[in-house]
Image (cartoon, helix red, strand yellow):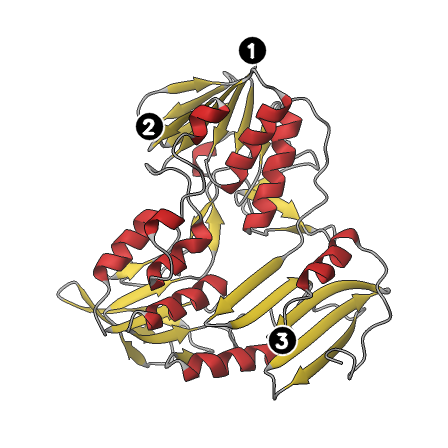
Amino acid sequence: MMRYVIIGASAAGLAAAESIRQWDPRGAITLISDEPHPPYSRPLLTYLLSGEVSLEKIWLKSADYFEKWGFEVLLGERVVQVAAGEREVRLQSGRVCPYDRLLISSGARPRLPGVPGEDLEGVFTLRTLADWRRLDAALPEGGEVAVVGAGPVGLKAAEALSHRGCRVALVEMESQVLPRLVDAQAAAMLEGELKKWGIDVYCNAAPRGIVEVKGQVQALALADGRELPAQVVLFAIGVTPNTEFLGNTGLAAAGGIPVNPRLETGQPDIFAAGDCVQGVNLLTGQPAYVPIWPAAVEQGKIAGANMAGADRRYPGALPQNSISLRGFKIITGGLAHPEAEDVEITSELDRHRGQYRRLVYREGRLVGLTLVGAVADAGIYFQLMSQQLPAIEPMTPGRLWG
């Protein structure tokens, strides 16, 4: 009987376990998670923070899920070493898990900027359920909060905190919100909405440190000398792969674990999937770190099938983001903010309706998309991009909304 061990029990790990079971009904499948909770949806943490969903709504699986699928699950167990030579996974508790095939789907953790004071009790990130519990308990009623990072997580967190009645300052080091995802027009529309909701936006603003008095956070200090009053500071400046337990295995790299199209690593019978992986951009074929939920699920499915004897290839990740803030919607995908010169860009703005559409083409194929307001056609565009089908002639002004 084949022994499968999966490090990580979130999007990629769960998808892989189910895929293995479909290919190998008898194999022994063990999932290891360093969190004590059953699997939950990380994207819903900001909705939990705002109060839009209850705790009961975030669980991904039913209470009897692991039993039904015949999985062994080890919750609250931290992996400290992968001994590839001995084909063992070693846990902090002293337990050893032998394997025939191993999947590393250990995910990622939030990055911190490395400024003075970031270790204070009033400084937070939002990646795990434990993070949410700490932040939720510490929020000052009607108090001041600084959110650093205006990417998708930072934006949703800022909106959630505003919804909770906090006075929110949103700080972004680049010149606009969503700096790597949208152009200046889409960013300006979003910033206008944020300001309507009472969120103060500070762009071109780098954090210099946390101002504290007797261990209590008082303000966020910026590099230009300004201080933004805050009793809580939340950093949302990106993530870094969880690969520290791989030690001298040679599996990890700065941008995640390198894998081939079968999602195999450089070691025999060790696969990797999800946010810990250094992937490939589907549109460019170049190495890319794309830590998004849909990519993790797809990688998990393919890795699991291959672990059980299939021969499937992962074509690469299509970058995509969907952001909904109080009914204001933005969807981006592909090379939504391209730097290359060999592209054609068409766009149309309807200020009255608050709608904006920007399409990026290369050699007659759609390679980038930004939709603001009217997002109903996003699925069609993503299918065109993912399959790299020839697109209809680039849309011209006047045809986008009829």
The amino acid pointed to by label 1 is Met
Residue 13: give x, y in percent of width and height.
51, 35
**Is label 3 in contact with label 2 (beta carbons under 8 Å)?**
no
SS at badge 1: loop
Give the residue number, with chain letter if any, for mark 1. 1
Between marks 2 and 1, how big is the CA–CA gap?
A: 26 Å
Residue 92 - label:
2
* Residue 161 higher or lower than 229, as above or below: above
Q: Amino acid at mark 3?
A: Asp
Q: Residue, x 78% and y 83% (percent of image)?
A: 397
Q: As shown in the figure, which amino acid type bears the numbered disc 2?
A: Gln
**Residue 183, disc:** 3
Q: Earlier in the sequence, mark 2 or mark 1?
A: 1
Q: Look at the numbered disc 3 and give the secondary structure of its residue.
A: loop
- Looking at the image, residue 152 sits to the left or right of residue 388; the answer is left
In the rendering, at what x and y percent does residue 51 appear? 33, 61
**Residue 131: image tag:** none
Q: CA distance from mark 3 to mark 2?
A: 46 Å
Density class for disc 1 (Cα within 10 Å; few <14, some 14-19, many ≥20) is few
